[in-house]
Amino acid sequence: MGRHTKATCKLCRRAKEKLHLKGEKCVSDKCPFLKRSYPPGQHGRIPSRPSEYGIRLREKQKARRIYGLTERQFEGYFDLAARKKGATGDMLIEFLERRLDNVVFRLGFSSSRQEARQLVHHGGILVNGRKVDVPSYQVKVDDVISVKPARLSQVKIVLEKFPDHTPPPWLTQSEEMEGKVVAIPKREEIDTSLEDHLIVEYYSR
């Protein structure tokens, strides 16, 4: 399964909530979800009662779309989380949050995870002073994430557009446009509106 190449805003309408996939557009009056908050398609306005399976499937799809992963990638993270000690749902969210593209987004260096993924893939991000162009790279405690000099102007524009952005507690950001991982992300520190127990139930069926 390839990446989603059609209208991104339809994914928010399908989930019946904003997933903030388009960065600046999502917080502006141009967001299509504000005008059409019902699901896309000719039957979108017709009320429906999803099945138990449908509820769990939608939650899994929502998580996958928020972090921009393919089905195979998401299943890989779930299998990895299931093998770790602790709550599977918490471990799954931790692995997703520790992706380098997500960390770049959380630090405010990009307006969306899709933009962060492109920034990483094009070699614009350094980890501990070395270029890392793999968006799925798992950051560790004490890792320092910085922006390549050639990309500083691009990141400054994003920071100016979102001056009130605040990184989560497990990340710190300096004025030199550097970020540091100070702790492993905890579930209660992550503001993503996901009911991870439904995802676990989906894969445990």
Image (tube, rainbow, N blue to C red):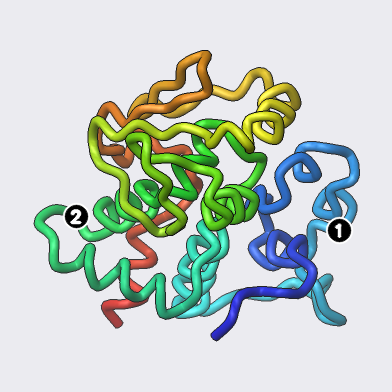
Image coordinates for residue 166, horizontal then vertical, percent: 53, 22
Q: Which residue corresponds to mark 2?
A: 87
Image coordinates for residue 60, horizontal then vertical, percent: 46, 68
Identify which residue is drawn at 66% across, 40% down.
111
Q: Which residue corresponds to mark 1?
A: 36
Image coordinates for residue 31, horizontal then vertical, percent: 84, 48
- Indicate the secondary structure of the residue bearing disc 1: loop
Identify which residue is drawn at 69% across, 65% down.
11
Identify which residue is drawn at 54% across, 41% down.
105
- Residue type for callout 1: Arg
Name above or below for residue 186 compared with residue 83. Answer: above
Mark before the other along the chain sequence, 2 or 1? 1
Looking at this view, is 133 or 20 the one in front? 133
Identify which residue is drawn at 35% across, 75% down.
75
Name above or below for residue 48 compared with residue 132. Answer: below
Image coordinates for residue 34, horizontal then vertical, percent: 84, 48
- The crowd level at tag 1 (other Cα within 10 Å; few <14, some 14-19, many 20+) is some
- Residue type for callout 2: Ala
